[in-house]
Amino acid sequence: MPLSDWADRLLARDRDAVAPALNLADDARPEAVAATRTLLDRLESEAPQRALRIGITGAPGAGKSTLIDALVRELRANDRTVGIIAVDPSSQRSGGALLGDRMRVRSGASDEGVFLRSMAARSRLGGLADATRAGVEILAAVFDWVLVETVGVGQSESDVAHLVHSLAFVAHPDAGDSLQFIKAGILEWPDLFVVNKADLGPSAERSAAELEASLGLASAREDGWTPPVLLASARDSRGVSEIRECLEAHRAHLEANDQLEVRLRAGRRHSLVAALERRYGHFGIEALGGREALEKKIEASPQPSASLALKLAEAIEAKLREG
Ligand SMILES: Nc1nc2c(ncn2[C@@H]2O[C@H](COP(=O)(O)OP(=O)(O)O)[C@@H](O)[C@H]2O)c(=O)[nH]1
Ligand SMILES: [Mg+2]
């Protein structure tokens, strides 16, 4: 099937086009890379950006996958379709089947309203960030909500924050965690904190109170949003509708402040610069006049991100050849 048909089918929200499109985006051969670029350009300029994009991050074992499973059932009960990308290093061992199996069992394999793609965090480094972004753009064309599960280890919070509208941080109910959050510089990114495993007893409430206190010490956010701290038990599906409501409230907050598109565009800009920096290093960015000038250039360009990325890469290579 010609590529333009896949794009048309995604734009018509055809679920059957999602898997082949994701495979295309995963294909490193030059013709597939070029085709993916065309596809992503079309989605960026033609798809209505209606999907709510949510990042779910937190330490391994915090309960992110379990929470996503519960959230998917909550969203399906509210007639929302959901696409999920799980970037999970542990799925390397389990073959990426962990969350998938659980969801197939509980949400039903025949549910057309749910789509899951696991990406093992293979040694692709930068490639993973690009593949995740492509996956999010593809899922966002078709589904109402897009959930991205990533393991949080400091830096990855800012990476995933640039992919989504809202970032939720899932925390263990251990006292003392919040000090680690502060050390890792994590607190500034999430729009919502969930202290999970509240069924384990009072330690969850203590953690939530501590977390709230640490957040109270942080300076007020420029965007005027105060990230709530919610208690939940993903295992018992407790607190899950509150999480959905909070994410919807955050979307409404972004919309009311005209930040929905702005945040998406800023995220694309950030990812584009980050990709160029990974590939060409600091030299490459300087060759185009430095980060600030480059960001301005990207902001002013009418070209969609994927083809703009190619154009900028070519400009850097030309400069480097000139010496
Ligand atoms: N008691 C309890 N256990 C939970 C809860 N949520 C997840 N778990 C368990 O915690 C472990 C890690 O969960 P998982 O969702 O895989 O964590 P992830 O690594 O953050 O994706 C599993 O054994 C889950 O069954 C919860 O709300 N309560
Ligand atoms: Mg997981």
Image: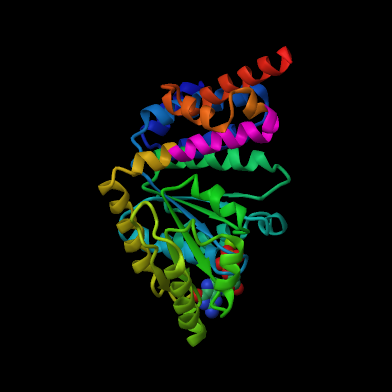
Residue 212, how many percent across, how many down? 43, 73
Quarter of image, res 172:
bottom right
The answer to whether residue 201 of the structure is visible from this angle is no
> Is 83 or 61 nearer to us in this picture?
61
Residue 52, how many percent across, how many down? 38, 48
Of the 4 image quadrants, the one containing the C terminus is top right
Rendering quadrant holding ligand 2: bottom right
> Is 274 or 86 nearer to us in this picture?
274
Is residue 270 one of those drawn in magenta?
yes
Is residue 45 one of those drawn in magenta?
no
Tell me the residue at 71%/18% (across/down). 320
> Is 232 or 270 nearer to us in this picture?
270
- The majority secondary structure of the magenta stretch comes to helix
Tell me the residue at 45%/74% (across/down). 213
Tell me the residue at 45%/69% (across/down). 217
Residue 259, how many percent across, how many down? 34, 44
Q: In this view, does 249 lie above or below 128?
A: below
Tell me the residue at 32%/52% (across/down). 251
How are the residues colored? rainbow
The answer to whether residue 62 of the structure is visible from this angle is yes
User: From which residue to which does the magenta span run?
Assistant: 266-283
Q: In this view, does 145 lie above or below 265?
A: below
Q: On the rendered structure, is 93 left or right of 51?
A: right
Q: On the rendered structure, is 32 left or right of 138?
A: right
Residue 99, how many percent across, how many down? 57, 60
Q: How many labels does the image show?
A: 0
Q: On the rendered structure, is 178 left or right of 30?
A: left
